[in-house]
Every structure is written in C-alpha cells, then in structure tokens.
Amino acid sequence: MSSTETPLKNNQQTKRRWNGTDLGLIAVFAALVAGAALVPGLALNGFGVPITFQTLAVMLTGLVLGPARGFAAVGLYTLLGLAGLPIFSQGRSGLGILAGPSAGYIIAFPIAAGVVGWLATVVIKRTTKARALWFFLAATATSIVFVHTLGIAGIALNSKATLEQAFLSDLVFYPGDIIKNVLAAAIAVALHRAFPDVLVRRVRRRALAPKSA
C-alpha cells in the first residue's frame, strides 16, 4: 500500500458525502414531486387511480439528481405523505393509501427515481450525443418495468380485479407517460447544460480520479 493511498481514499469518500447543496436539491425536488401531485388529475382507468404529473416529476428528479439523491428526494416525498401530509394525488395522505389501488405506483416512485438516475449517470459517462433520446428511453424503460408493473400489482392486490383487468386499466397511462417522459428528458438535458455541476462533473471527477497503486 502506498503512502498516498489512505489520504486519497479519504479524499474520495469526502467527495461522495452530501453537502448542503445536495440536501437542498433533495428538498427542492421532493417539493416538486409534491407540487406535481397536487395538480388535479383525471381518474380514467376505472379504479380511481388518477392521471397526474407525478411521473414527470419523478423521472425528472432521477434524471437530474442521479440515483442516490433522486431516490432520497422521492423517498422523502413518499414518507411525508405516508406520515400524514396531504401531498399525494387528490390531497390524500396516510398509511391508508397503501390499501388503495394507487399503492403500487406510490411504492414504485422512489425505486423508479433511483433506477432512472443510475441510467442517467451511465448515459452521461458514456455519451455526449443524443442524450435527450437516451434519457427518454431510460425513463420509458424504467416506467414500464417498475412503475407500471408495481402499479398493476397494487391494483390487483387491493381490489377485486384480476391481473388482466389491472393490466388493461393501466394501459390508459401509457400515452401520457410517453409525453411526460419526452418532457422530462428535454428538461433534464437543459438543466444539465445550464448547471453541469448538478451531476455531470460529479461523474467525471469520479471517473478521472487517480487510482491507488
């Protein structure tokens, strides 16, 4: 072990710790998700699960903040809602939401933010071109695999619907999700260009940091 190995590791660990800016961003994006949930939604799927701007805010949070902070921001929003703040769609709150048809979607939100944040990090590390397209694909894949899958499971478990009925009811969300993912990708690219320190330089610093002998 070289004499510089320990200081180098300590320096890298320090860089990975969240500072005041990180905590502020987590709080801001948690508020963004809450604000998106409070915009009146349309319940068109037959089980009372409304179409809202939440998925736009969740995907945007992950794409901008990355996996850990994205998960923390949406997780904070979720915990506050479950604790009783009326910040879920239609002003709902409390643990009772987990017994309703929206439970799967709400549980999926922090997971989706973390996954799409990780995918955004991969995109930023590996390409400088067509990032909006890659962000859109990342958000769409994450939405299908996690948000829709868990959403369908929640509808089936908390209602008398079969999996087939839950799946068919979930299809109503896809057109809106495509539009919201396009918007999330475009906004995320614009934010990364305007504020490269949000995620891009963090990734580059870690990738370029010298390795110990």
Image (spheres, grey):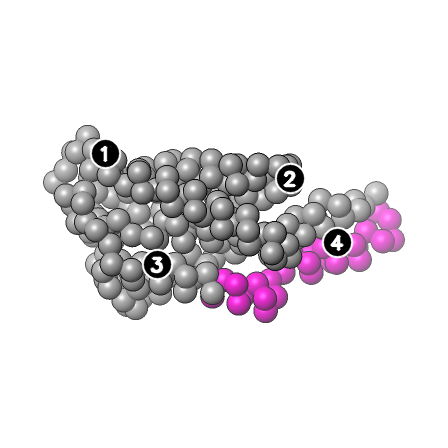
Q: Quadrant of the C terminus?
A: top right
Identify the residue position indicated by label 1 in the image. 167
Of the two numbered discs 1 and 3 in the rendering, the one whose residue sits closer to the viewer: 3
In this picture, residue 47 sits left or right of residue 55: left
Spatial separation of the CA atoms under disc 4 and disc 1:
48 Å
Work out whether mark 1 precedes mark 3 in sequence or the reverse, and give the earlier one.
3
Work out whether mark 2 precedes mark 3 in sequence or the reverse, and give the earlier one.
3
Work out whether mark 3 precedes mark 4 in sequence or the reverse, and give the earlier one.
4
Residue 105 placed where, x, y %?
Answer: 30, 47
In this picture, residue 109 sits left or right of residue 165: right
Work out whether mark 4 precedes mark 1 in sequence or the reverse, and give the earlier one.
4
Spatial separation of the CA atoms under disc 2 and disc 4:
29 Å
Identify the residue position indicated by label 4 in the image. 9
Residue 42 placed where, x, y %?
Answer: 21, 51
Of the two numbered discs 4 and 1 in the rendering, the one whose residue sits closer to the viewer: 1
Residue 159 placed where, x, y %?
Answer: 15, 44
Which stretch appears magenta? 1-27
Q: Is residue 6 magenta?
A: yes
In this picture, residue 152 sits left or right of residue 140: left
- 10 Å crowding of disc 1: few (<14), some (14-19), many (20+): some
Residue type for callout 1: Phe
Of the two numbered discs 2 and 4 in the rendering, the one whose residue sits closer to the viewer: 2
The reply to whether discs 2 and 1 touch (Cβ–Cβ < 8 Å) is: no
The image's mark for residue 128 is 2
